Amino acid sequence: DTGVSQNPRHKITKRGQNVTFRCDPISEHNRLYWYRQTLGQGPEFLTYFQNEAQLEKSRLLSDRFSAERPKGSFSTLEIQRTEQGDSAMYLCASSLAHGGGRDTQYFGPGTRLTVL
Amino acid sequence: AQSVTQLDSQVPVFEEAPVELRCNYSSSVSVYLFWYVQYPNQGLQLLLKYLSGSTLVKGINGFEAEFNKSQTSFHLRKPSVHISDTAEYFCAVSLYDTGRRALTFGSGTRLQVQP
């Protein structure tokens, strides 16, 4: 169990550029989540996958954001036409499905995005 | 909709003193409760969770929390803190058996342990 990994750890981009982040979950975990955390705030849910299916999306996930998990393993989060307001830490988590909302989500170290 | 309130944004405390970090939640359905810790430039690490059963839950690093349904609270406590406990602490809830899997977090409490 090597934990959840995220790449890159830091990304600096100019406004209007596209960026893509990658998340590798714990190997046997079938659920994968994306959260966004701005300075001084708790993480806010963006979206989650069970295997390759995207089952829930937050209203925070505007049409400039897209997430995929093509083979039910790693996931990518793409932000198109970045804006300064997208600057945040993007956290990925994974869990093993249990009944109801009992899952324990294990978090990666995050990708810090700075949009200039 | 559910929400989580962490009443204290910062808690300064001296080393070896006891500490309590407060968490209150609001939800129209039953919830599961979690406390996570975040060290600088790192992701979140689970401290403890309440799913069912005994309302007093023990976690890692000597932390414990008590679920109080009538007061909708889940306060985190440690009898004697160490310098290494300096970090940001987040309380979170997930909804019981609704099909939704998102965690809803509070805004966090920064614990500052002073020598």
Image (spheres, coloured by chain):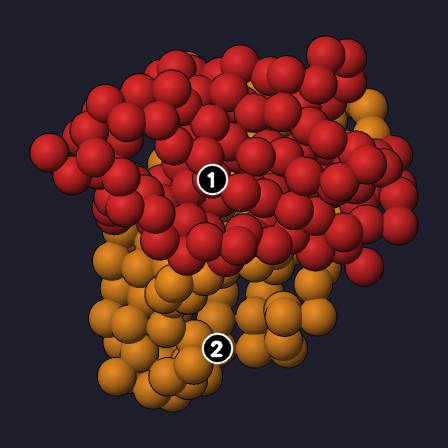
Of all chains, the one bearing label 2 is A
Q: Is residue A89 left or right of residue A93?
A: left
Q: Quadrant of the N terminus of chain A?
A: top left
Q: Is residue A30 left or right of residue B113?
A: right
> Which percent across, then down, holds residue B113?
22, 37
Q: Does the image show residue B43?
A: no
Q: Is residue B95 left or right of residue A23?
A: right
Q: Quadrant of the C terminus of chain A?
A: bottom left
Residue indicated by mark 1: B21
The amino acid type found where label 1 is placed reads Leu
Q: Residue furthest left?
A: B115
Residue indicated by mark 2: A80
- Residue in the foreground of this view, choosing between B46 and A72: B46
**Residue A103 sits in quarter:** top right
> Which percent across, then down, holds residue B23?
58, 44
**According to the rendering, which colour does chain A have?**
orange
Residue beneath the point at 72% across and 12% down: B54
**According to the rendering, which colour does chain B have?**
red
Numbered disc 1: secondary structure: strand
Crowd class of label 1 (few under 14; some 14 to 19; many from 20; radius 10 Å): many
> Which percent across, then down, holds residue A102?
73, 26
Residue beneath the point at 81% across and 50% down: B27
Q: Does the image show residue A11?
A: yes
The amino acid type found where label 2 is placed reads Gln
Numbered disc 2: secondary structure: loop
Of all chains, the one bearing label 1 is B
